[in-house]
Image (spheres, rainbow, N blue to C red):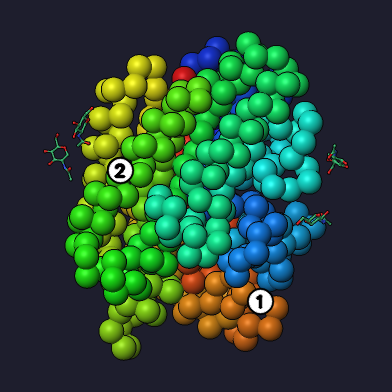
């Protein structure tokens, strides 16, 4: 896999007439928005139950440090930052390191349990997508004050903006809210989320973003907690109904994105598929170097996430490298590495 990533990086670099590392990242900055799959510590600063800044989270990260990342180690976006040639990760915008020149190579605005719909985020006191956008505007002012307007606008237009969200809209809101799922079919609910998505992208474009990658929904029905909550008793298989909803949502995401691309001049907007790479790991674990794709590493592996996955959880595996899932909702570092390799290949149009 490492060879593969190097090969791809080299191909990308070759296009830019430089196949040797120059210490210069491929894009000026990396901006991250979305939910717990990409939150690197913003929720630490919030009053919310959705946190991961305690062991065993982060036990395989640098210095075994629980930073607020919802995994045992690196997130897919950490690998992405490395693959793009950055020597540091985008700082969580709410953290103390988010100041001065640290901001020039990007920032992370994501918040665990936020969704396309601000109502989802509010249920968990997460940072809504609209607030993430406000924080991004504030960030832009800070960068502009440091480097001046012309350089700042170059940074914003050249930066890759990654948006990864939507799982909470379904698993932490739609499926468990009897009112929502009585009013909307999954199809209509997805249409509603598309409106929020479309408005968000137009607003992001409005403040100068020109390179945007948005991840699809994962196979919702294969997340260990979803199997526990939504499969029949004793059924250990992915919940097909949830996966169908995810596929249908992802098709809409693609259509809406094509539409946005056609209507917003100069915008590169790529839909990054994480559904199929993750499904592939779940269905063919051995081929991908895993032996456990149903149970997560943390605790009993059936449900535990955020505060329920803690140092007193009983049954936590000793080594997460052979597990696809770290906790009930989130991939292990090993799975994130595979996802990032896929993101890189799909994201090439954002770099060139
Ligand atoms: C661990 O992460 C926290 C932020 O969550 C940071 O303040 C601290 O310096 C880190 N400790 C080490 C040893 O890296
Ligand atoms: C900027 O961040 C550094 C490192 O966390 C910290 O020591 C410093 O006090 C911060 N400066 C300001 C002005 O907040
Ligand atoms: C996606 O777009 C295609 C072609 O424009 C159309 O036929 C299809 O119905 C659309 N699908 C959805 C789910 O909107
Ligand atoms: C595409 O955009 C147009 C307006 O620009 C809108 O009328 C149409 O409904 C959109 N289609 C989809 C599939 O989003
Ligand atoms: C949508 O899907 C088509 C067919 O798979 C693909 O060619 C296109 O690039 C996708 N659109 C976006 C915006 O990713
Ligand atoms: C986990 O297992 C992998 C391969 O089996 C090994 O390379 C790694 O060192 C182990 N990690 C720990 C923390 O034991």
Quarter of the render that holds ligand 1: bottom right
Q: Specify whether 257 is left or right of 125.
A: left
- The quarter of the displayed image where residue 333 is located: bottom right
- The quarter of the displayed image where residue 177 is located: bottom left
Where does residue 150 sit, x and y in percent of width and height? 63, 11
Labelled pair 1, 2 in contact (Cβ < 8 Å): no
Looking at the image, how many numbered discs can be counted on the residues?
A: 2
The Cα–Cα distance between marks 1 and 2, rounded to whole angstroms, is 37 Å
Q: Using the image as rendered, state which of residue 344 and residue 4 is in the foreground.
A: 344
Q: Secondary structure at mark 2?
A: helix
N-term-proximal mark, 1 vs 2: 2
Q: Is residue 252 above or below residue 324?
A: above
Answer yes or no: is residue 196 visible. Answer: yes
Q: Is residue 147 above or below residue 5?
A: above
Q: Using the image as rendered, state which of residue 149 and residue 157 is in the foreground.
A: 149
Identify which residue is drawn at 39% across, 17% down: 266
Identify which residue is drawn at 48% across, 58% down: 121
Residue topped by disc 2: 195
Q: Callout 1 environment at 10 Å: few (<14), some (14 to 19), or many (20+)?
A: some
Answer yes or no: is residue 332 visible. Answer: no
Residue topped by disc 1: 310
Q: Secondary structure at mark 1?
A: loop
Where does residue 71 sit, x and y in percent of width and height? 60, 61
Identify which residue is drawn at 66% across, 59% down: 46
């Amino acid at each position: 896999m490492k060879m593969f990533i190097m090969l791809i990086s080299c191909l990308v670099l070759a296009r830019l007439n430089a196949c040797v590392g120059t210490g210069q990242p491929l894009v000026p900055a990396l901006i991250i928005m979305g939910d717990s799959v990409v939150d690197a510590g913003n929720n630490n600063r919030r009053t919310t139950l959705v946190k991961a800044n305690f062991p065993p989270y982060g036990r395989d990260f640098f210095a075994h440090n629980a930073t607020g990342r919802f995994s045992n180690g690196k997130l897919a976006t950490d690998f992405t930052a490395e693959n793009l040639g950055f020597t540091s990760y985008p700082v969580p915008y709410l953290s103390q390191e988010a100041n001065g020149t640290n901001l020039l190579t990007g920032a992370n605005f994501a918040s665990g349990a936020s969704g396309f719909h601000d109502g989802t985020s509010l249920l968990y006191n997460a940072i809504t997508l609209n607030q993430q956008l406000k924080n991004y505007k504030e960030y832009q002012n800070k960068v502009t004050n440091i480097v001046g307007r012309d350089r700042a606008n170059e940074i914003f237009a050249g930066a890759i903006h990654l948006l990864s969200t939507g799982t909470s809209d379904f698993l932490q809101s739609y499926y468990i809210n009897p009112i929502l799922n009585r009013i909307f079919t999954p199809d209509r609910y997805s249409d509603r989320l598309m409106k929020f998505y479309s408005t968000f992208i137009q607003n992001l474009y409005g403040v100068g973003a020109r390179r945007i990658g948005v991840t699809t929904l994962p196979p919702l029905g294969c997340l260990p907690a979803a199997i526990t909550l939504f499969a029949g008793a004793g059924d250990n298989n992915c919940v097909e109904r949830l996966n169908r909803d995810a596929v249908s949502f992802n098709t809409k995401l693609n259509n809406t994105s094509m539409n946005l691309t056609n209507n917003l001049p100069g915008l590169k907007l790529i839909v990054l598929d994480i559904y199929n790479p993750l499904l592939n790991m779940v269905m063919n674990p051995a081929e991908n170097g895993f032996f456990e794709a149903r149970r997560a590493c943390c605790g009993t592996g059936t449900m535990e996430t955020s505060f329920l996955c803690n140092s007193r959880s009983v049954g936590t595996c000793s080594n997460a490298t052979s597990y696809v899932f770290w906790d009930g909702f989130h991939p292990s570092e090993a799975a994130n590495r595979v996802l990032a390799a896929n993101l890189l290949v799909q994201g090439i149009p954002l770099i060139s």
